[in-house]
Every structure is written in C-alpha cells, then in structure tokens.
C-alpha cells in the first residue's frame, strides 16, 4: 500500500475532470451488449449443466456472478447520471437493472448520494457506508456494545451472512418517511422480482431455478460488499470533523485506488479507481482509466493492491490520534500505556 497522497486544490481538479464527464452512447451500448448477452449465456449454461454436474454449473455461476457485479456498476453509473446523457434514459435503465441486482434504483440512488456527500465526515457516519467507530467510541461502549460491534465487523458477518441479508431481505423494505418515488422503487422492484421468480420457477422448476440463481445472487452480493469495503477501509484513509473535513481530501485520500488485475478490473467496471469516481461521480466507468492515465496528480492516492487488500479485512477502528484505521489488537496495545499511566 502506497500512502503518498497528492491532493490538487479545488480549482485544479475542477479544471481537470470535465473532458472525461461526457457519456458516449456507443460505449454505453457496447458495455450493455458485452455484459448482458454473456450473462444470459452463462445462466443458460449453468442451468443445463445441472443435468451433468453441479460443480460445472457452479463454475458458470461464478462467471455469471462477475457479470452481475458489472451490471451493478452500470446501475451505479445510471444513479450518478453518467451512463447516458439523458436523465430519463438513466432512470429507466437503472430501474430495469435493479431487477438483476435486487437494488431498488431510486431508493439506492438516494442513499448513495448521501454517502458521496458525507464520505469521510466523522459527524455524518452511517449514510450508506460500513459503520466505523473511533477507538475512543469503542472503549466507551459497554461490554455488550463492544461485542455487538465486533460481531458486525467480523469477516464472516461483514462478507458472509451480511451481504445476503442486505440484498435479499433488507433492500425489500423501506420506511414511509421517504419520497413516494423511493417507496415505489422498493415495492415495485419487489413485485417485479417476485413475478420473475414465480414465472421462472413455474417454467424451469423452482429447485433448479434457485440452484442457479441463488449462488449467483449470494456471491455477487458478497463481492459488492467487499468492493465497497475496500474502497474506503484501508489504513491511510481519511476521516475528519467539520470544519476540517474537505470534499477533495475525502475523495482523493478517503477513497482508494484498488489496483486489480485487468480481468477483474473489467468485471468490476473500473470501480477500483474509486478516488477519481468520488472526486467526480459524473465520469462514466469507461472513462476512469483514461482520466487516471492522463493526469499524474491522480496517480498517488492510497493504493491498495489485490493481495494487500485482504489484510484490510482486519481493520476495525479509526484512531483519531494516529489518523489511521487500526485493528482491535492494535487499538488494545495502544491503550495499555494509557491504562498504566492512569494507574
């Protein structure tokens, strides 16, 4: 991990990003074609291979999973108005893709906009992010409170049980304080998904349909949560309290450059170039790499490589004194000298 951020001033970065903010309908259409058609082929292959070998079927499911993750990136771009120039086109496509990702488009778009507006702001945690306590907040909790937080941050919960619960159950409900459009998005998506499940189950058989679809959904949801975690949970990330909090700092220092192998970068739609995305969400996914290549000032954020990323799963707490994320053990070791001095 490279921790040598160079943050351009506001005027500078706002001059750099406009050339990359223009969606191209041909590029977007090609992305849909080279993703949705292979996804359909992989799904059919996985279904037919059930008669031969479930292991072979799961291999096709794994490939389909990568394509569903890529579909989510397209839906994500629609939410930022960066997949097509037309807002109605983005909204229609985003809503339709929500049937594949199980993410109600307008509700997700609202929550995700809160995340972008408050990323790295210690006073506005909890809006579409991975809940993170400071070391002081964790120490101030009751034993039960510390246990609950440890349970939430355990990899088996955060990347195992949690993603399935989030995508299959949590996203199916909303409170009635949100807008009618967001409520309609949630329950309209639910009805459409339910109709698709009933139709496919009646046509193909429920057991066989779920034998293909359920692994794809569970794996895709786990990968999506992992990617979101890696985009913001790395040692030298950025958290600050207003008025010190700064938008450009939170983007270029608080969002990682998750440097993946090229094939994984394709499946994840360049979302690993997350610092530039946070700086300018209007840049389409297919322009992020060009923006990075042509602007050296963006090439020095907190770089997280593929293998180094797995060590980030041990990060749990924000240490305000050292300005870095730490694990529970490291936080406890740091507290020992304080406890001895107090005694």
Image (cartoon, rainbow, N blue to C red):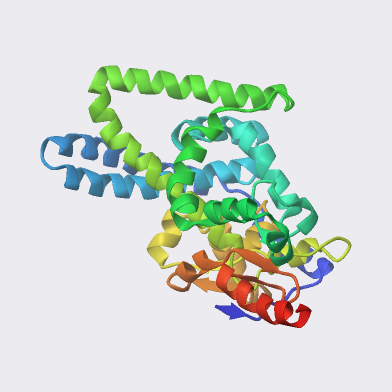
Tell me where residue 303 appears, x and y as whole percent.
56, 74
Give the side of residue 43 with respect to residue 24, left or right. left
Give the side of residue 256 with respect to residue 57, left or right. right
Looking at the image, is 271 positioned above or below residue 193?
Answer: below
Looking at the image, is 298 positioned above or below residue 231?
Answer: below
Looking at the image, is 247 positioned above or below residue 294?
Answer: above
User: Residue at left 31%, top 49%?
Assistant: 63
Q: Please indicate, yes or no, whether residue 327 appears anywhere in the rendered image.
A: no
Tell me where residue 212 appears, x and y as whole percent.
28, 36
> Residue 217 lies in what quarter of the image?
top left
Q: Residue furthest right?
A: 243
User: Residue at left 55%, top 33%?
Assistant: 171
Q: Nearer the viewer, residue 241 or 292?
A: 241
Q: Please indicate, yes or no, whether residue 316 appears anywhere in the rendered image.
A: yes
User: Residue at left 41%, top 44%?
Assistant: 68
Looking at the image, is 144 positioned above or below residue 330?
Answer: above
Tell me where residue 39 appears, x and y as whole percent.
34, 41
Split into 4 quadrants, where in the image is the C terminus?
Answer: bottom right
Count of labels in the image: 0
Q: Nearer the viewer, residue 114 or 153?
A: 153
Q: Nearer the viewer, residue 156 or 256?
A: 156
Split into 4 quadrants, where in the image is the N terminus?
Answer: bottom right
């Amino acid at each position: 991990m490279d921790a040598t951020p160079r943050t351009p001033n506001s005027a500078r970065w706002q001059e750099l990003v406009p050339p990359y903010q223009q969606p191209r309908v041909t590029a977007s259409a090609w992305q849909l074609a080279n993703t949705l058609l292979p996804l359909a082929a992989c799904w059919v292959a996985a279904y037919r291979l059930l008669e031969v070998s479930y292991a072979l079927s799961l291999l096709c499911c794994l490939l389909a999973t990568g394509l569903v993750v890529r579909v989510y990136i397209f839906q994500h771009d629609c939410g930022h108005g960066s997949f097509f120039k037309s807002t109605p086109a983005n909204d229609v496509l985003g809503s339709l893709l929500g049937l594949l990702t199980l993410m109600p488009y307008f509700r997700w778009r609202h929550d995700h906009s809160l995340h972008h507006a408050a990323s790295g702001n210690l006073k506005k945690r909890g809006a579409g992010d991975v809940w993170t306590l400071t070391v002081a907040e964790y120490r101030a909790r009751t034993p039960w409170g510390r246990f609950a937080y440890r349970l939430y941050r355990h990899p088996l919960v955060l990347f195992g049980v949690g993603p399935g619960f989030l995508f299959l159950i949590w996203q199916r409900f909303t409170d009635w304080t949100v807008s009618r459009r967001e409520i309609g998005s949630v329950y309209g998506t639910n009805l459409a998904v339910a109709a698709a499940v009933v139709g496919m189950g009646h046509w193909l058989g429920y057991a066989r349909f779920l034998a293909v679809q359920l692994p794809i959904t569970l794996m895709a949801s786990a990968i999506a949560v992992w990617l979101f975690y890696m985009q913001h949970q790395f040692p030298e990330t950025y958290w600050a309290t207003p008025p010190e909090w700064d938008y450009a700092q939170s983007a270029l220092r608080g969002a990682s450059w998750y440097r993946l192998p090229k094939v994984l970068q394709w499946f994840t739609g360049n979302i690993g170039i997350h610092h530039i995305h946070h700086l300018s969400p209007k840049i389409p996914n297919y322009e992020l790499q060009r923006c990075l290549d042509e602007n050296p000032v963006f090439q020095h954020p907190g770089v997280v490589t593929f293998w180094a990323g797995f060590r980030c799963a041990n990060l749990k707490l924000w240490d305000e004194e050292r300005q870095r994320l730490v694990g529970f053990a490291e936080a406890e070791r740091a507290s020992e000298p304080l406890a001895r001095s107090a005694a």
